[in-house]
Image (spheres, rainbow, N blue to C red):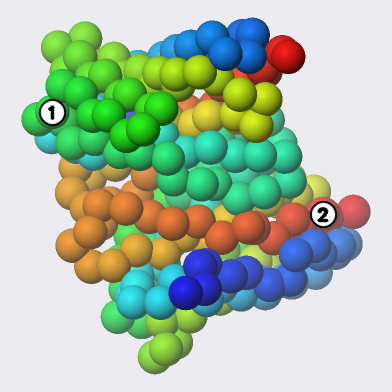
Amino acid sequence: GEDVEQSLFLSVREGDSSVINCTYTDSSSTYLYWYKQEPGAGLQLLTYIFSNMDMKQDQRLTVLLNKKDKHLSLRIADTQTGDSAIYFCAENFDGGSQGNLIFGKGTKLSVKP
Amino acid sequence: DAGVTQSPTHLIKTRGQQVTLRCSPKSGHDTVSWYQQALGQGPQFIFQYYEEEERQRGNFPDRFSGHQFPNYSSELNVNALLLGDSALYLCASSAARKATQYFGPGTRLTVL
């Protein structure tokens, strides 16, 4: 079945780079997403990538996709205390743009000053 | 441009009661999806509405039902509430043939 897995915790120092990893199981062409959730809030879409791409960069965020290994990562450059949050990896289950999203359990990023 | 809005923010109910949650999509969006997020978990897909019809459904019982109105806003109804229905209920909207879903702030439901 479909499954998205993430490590649960990551702790970094302010100014360092953070790398959050995710693995997924669906083998069809699909969209993959990174969402950020701050305490008591909804999900904020950070970025997304289609499975025919290897990399996408957006300011401090870099997404890398290894389709062969079904591995997705999110790199945050120059991590700030405001980046402390839970980061969710999600896969578009139906492989199209209107399918439902399958989420991992989230990685809690703690940024120490 | 208002984003996705949800009401109410918080809700407390007792077992066996019924609840209705509301969602207004982002301007220009016509598709609404509902997710349930239990504490410490990722969101789980409940169902999706498009053109006032349920287009897809996740693994949730019939106690969970919904509706979409002509203005694209949506309601989620849950009957015969159980303690396990306590969660953050998230609404997401998207535009047809677009890859991105945008989430509202959620409704926190507590069942006592």
Mark 2 burial class by Cα count in 10 Å: few <14, some 14-19, many 20+? some
Q: Amino acid at mark 2?
A: Thr
Residue identified by numbered label 2: B110
In this orientation, which residue lies closer to the viewer: A73 or B58?
A73
Q: Is residue B88 left or right of residue A66?
A: right
Q: Position of residue A25 (x, y in %)?
A: 28, 22
Q: How dense is the environment of label 1, judged by Cα within 10 Å: few (below 14), some, or many (20 and up)? A: few
Q: Quadrant of residue A91?
A: top left
Can you give x and y, in whole percent of width and height, for residue B62 in the image? 53, 63
Output the chain of dot 2. B
Q: Is residue A11 above or below residue B2?
A: above
On screen, residue B60 versus residue A59, left or right, reads right
Residue plotted at (57% across, 56% down): B90
Q: Which residue is mark 1?
A: A53
Image point 45% across, 19% down: which residue?
A77
**What's the residue type where badge 1 is placed?**
Met
Looking at the picture, do discs 2 and 1 lie on one chain? no
Residue B23 visible in the shown view = yes
Picture quadrant of residue A23? top left
Quarter of the image that includes the N terminus of chain A: top left
Q: Is residue B35 above or below residue A11?
A: below
| SS at badge 1 | loop
Rendered image quadrant of residue A21? top left
Of badges 2 and 1, the one in the foreground is 1
